[in-house]
Amino acid sequence: EYVDRLCTVEMRPPGPWPRGVTHKLYESVREKLGSPLTLLAAEKLVENLRKDDNVIITTGVGFLPYLPYGETDGPLGAAGLARALEVGLGARPIFVVGERDIPPVKACCQAAEISIHSYEIAQKKTHSGVVIPFPVEDEEGKEFSKEIIEKYDPKALISVERLGPNVKGIIHSIIGMDLTPRLGKVHYLFDEARRRKILTIGVADGGNEIGCGIIVE
């Protein structure tokens, strides 16, 4: 309960960003799922992941001209999760991100003592992970998602602050900017995972991220 409270403390910079939103979104999800959300996510990960299992982690909202090197909050959380899953459960983190999100993700992983290698090396080396760039184009993203799931056979997928589309298929920023042409459609990975009954977890704070379909109303 207390970890959930910490996660929903909302601190936003001055500007047009909506405020007073995160705890309301949390309460809506909590009402549907019952358990504290951090506890539920941890239990599901422990239940589904074993040593040397692959877990796909996606994050990042890098786009021109505003975020040419990605953003700061998603990669930090993704790297922290990767370390916890690698050290605690022996799982292998595979980051699937946009081209512009690769540098901050790699930097955060270095700080978390997760070294980034090719998949072949990561299979042999502890405290390591893989970074895979995801294409921007829609149809290419659909096919790429199927290929990734087939190739790596992940036992869980986690999205950390990665934007997803609304019911009209539009990916919005938190202030309503249409980012659909600029970002890879990583939600196709999660669509494919759900079809195969693979565990999916979404980490969000604004309602426009992957995972918020559970509270679309």
Image (tube, rainbow, N blue to C red):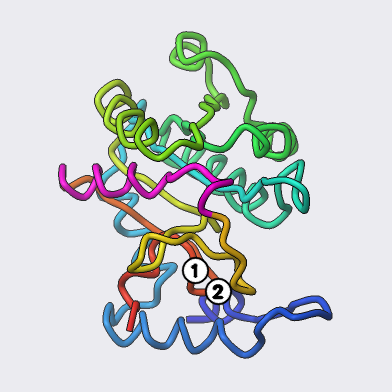
Disc 1 marks a residue whose amino acid type is Asn
**How many marks are shown on the rendered structure?**
2
Identified at 65% across, 83% down, the residue is 18
The answer to whether 137 appears left or right of 21 in the picture is left
Foreground: 141 or 14? 141
Above/below status of 3 relative to 165: below
Foreground: 24 or 64? 64
Foreground: 197 or 134? 134
Q: How far apart are marks 1 and 2 (CA)?
A: 6 Å
The label on residue 208 is 1
Q: Tag 2's secondary structure?
A: loop
Above/below status of 174 relative to 169: below
Which image quarter holds the C terminus?
A: bottom left
Q: Tag 1's secondary structure?
A: loop
The answer to whether 173 appears left or right of 217 in the picture is right
The magenta segment = 180-196
Residue 160 rendering spot, x and y as whole percentages:
52, 54
Identified at 29% across, 21% down, the residue is 151
| Mark 1 vs 2: CB contact within 8 A | yes
- The image quadrant of residue 7 is bottom right
Q: Mark 2 points at which residue?
A: 206
Mark 2 is surrounded, within 10 Å at the Cα level, by few (under 14), some (14 to 19) or many (20 or more) other residues, namely many
Identified at 38% across, 30% down, the residue is 140
**Is residue 73 highlighted in magenta?**
no
Disc 2 marks a residue whose amino acid type is Gly
Above/below status of 113 relative to 169: above
Residue 9 rendering spot, x and y as whole percentages:
64, 81
Mark 1 is surrounded, within 10 Å at the Cα level, by few (under 14), some (14 to 19) or many (20 or more) other residues, namely many
Residue 188 rendering spot, x and y as whole percentages:
33, 45
The answer to whether 104 appears left or right of 42 in the picture is right
